[in-house]
Image (cartoon, rainbow, N blue to C red):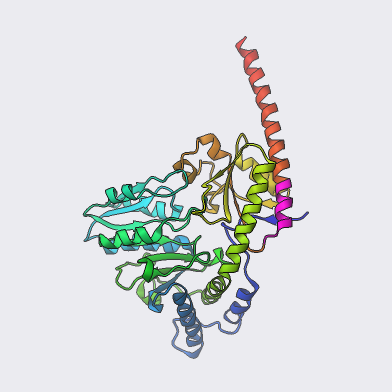
Amino acid sequence: MERIYLDNASTTTLSPEVLNAMMPALTSVYGNSASIHSFGREASNLIDQSRDTIAKTINAKSNEIYFTSSGSEANSMAIIGIANANRSRGNHIITSKIEHESVLNACKYLEKNGFQVTYLDVDSNGLINFTELLHAINANTILISIMSANNELGTIQFIKAIAQTAREKNIIFHTDAVQLYGHMDIDVVDMGIDVMTISGHKINGPKGSAVLYVNNNVKIDPIIFGGNQERNKRGGTCNTAGIVGLAKACEIAMRDMKSNNHKLRLLSEYFVSKLTSEIDHVIINANTRQKLPQIISATFVGVDGESLVTKLDINGVAVSTGSACTSNSLTVSHVMKAIGLSNDNARSTIRISLGKNNSYEELDNAIAIIKKSVSELREYSSTYGAKIRKRKGDRDV
């Protein structure tokens, strides 16, 4: 059976170029980068080169790049580390209701420790309201954290405008750019971004590798304690191979950005057109050009989303109900609730995320499988529902 992978917003395949770049750090350059002997210096040199490479892709300084194990760790470090380091200035944080769970849960943790958090509403496309943002800012606001592109909708926020607003108010601005990086040019100086999160496995790099960019003027405390790695901001032995792979993935993402974006837009337009024309009662959420085209949030009215994901998987098509970090949860997606979907429609929504390796043939085959699966689930639901109603009616007589 052919397997079709349409869950690229969860993770991507490891690029062969990236794997080749990692091999020396997995085999011959095995020293601990914190050691002062020659083995350690070899590893340290690879990490320094990687730091330089990544910094150039966002117009940052090399000493503003901090390596972490994941985007979630980087987000936690940003939210909690900045809050703790700047507590003397205030205790108020602003974020949105559709942030990644790593941001929301870090904010909830801080609320238990004396901080106040404002969670901004979003419109039906997932965009925040600038008027609401301005009204939320007060004298105690020390941090604004708004993700660049949403992981369930693909919606791209107006990050430069938000960052400039924060700078005018002397507020630190952090953005989770895990989904956006590699698909749009990001210049942290021009855009006014103070702190930013990047993750390797979203751009065909290795899992277990991520970056937190922190402007040198921003005070931030560590949340992981150990040695003096990462300039005393993040303890723990550096993942040399992962860092090298991340840097190579960043380099490739910049090199191929234009061609990849062009292909992904064409694939997305083709897929959405066929999906909506061949299957009845399908709603495409955040149907706007202010988004990443490869992330498609689709509501199949009257179909249970988890049942559909399972049925598609049995038939060789991999999609998800939303963020991979909460895919095992039975609760309704907080993102779908925030954009105004009813509980029924939220539970009928799946995320389809295309990748640069997908083909039109795969999409045609996936559409056929989705169409058949939706039809079968709707028929089952109708038949089963009728039986339940009949039984209930019999008891009522």
Residue 257 position within the rendered picture, expressed as x and y whole percent measured from the top left: 56, 68
Nearer to us in this view, 193 or 237: 193
Q: Is residue 318 above or below residue 394?
A: below
Q: Main secondary structure of the magenta part?
A: helix
Q: How many numbered circles does the render carry?
A: 0
Nearer to us in this view, 349 or 361: 361
As drawn, which residue projects farthest toward the bottom? 38
- The answer to whether 86 appears left or right of 1 in the picture is left
Q: Is residue 396 magenta?
A: no
Residue 62, image quadrant = bottom left
User: Looking at the figure, which quarter contains the N terminus?
Assistant: bottom right
Q: Which residues are magenta?
A: 358-368
As drawn, which residue projects farthest toward the right? 1
Q: Is residue 271 above or below residue 43?
A: above
User: Looking at the figure, which quarter contains the C terminus?
Assistant: top right
Residue 388, image quadrant = top right
Q: Is residue 362 magenta?
A: yes
Q: Residue at x 36, y 59 (%)?
A: 161
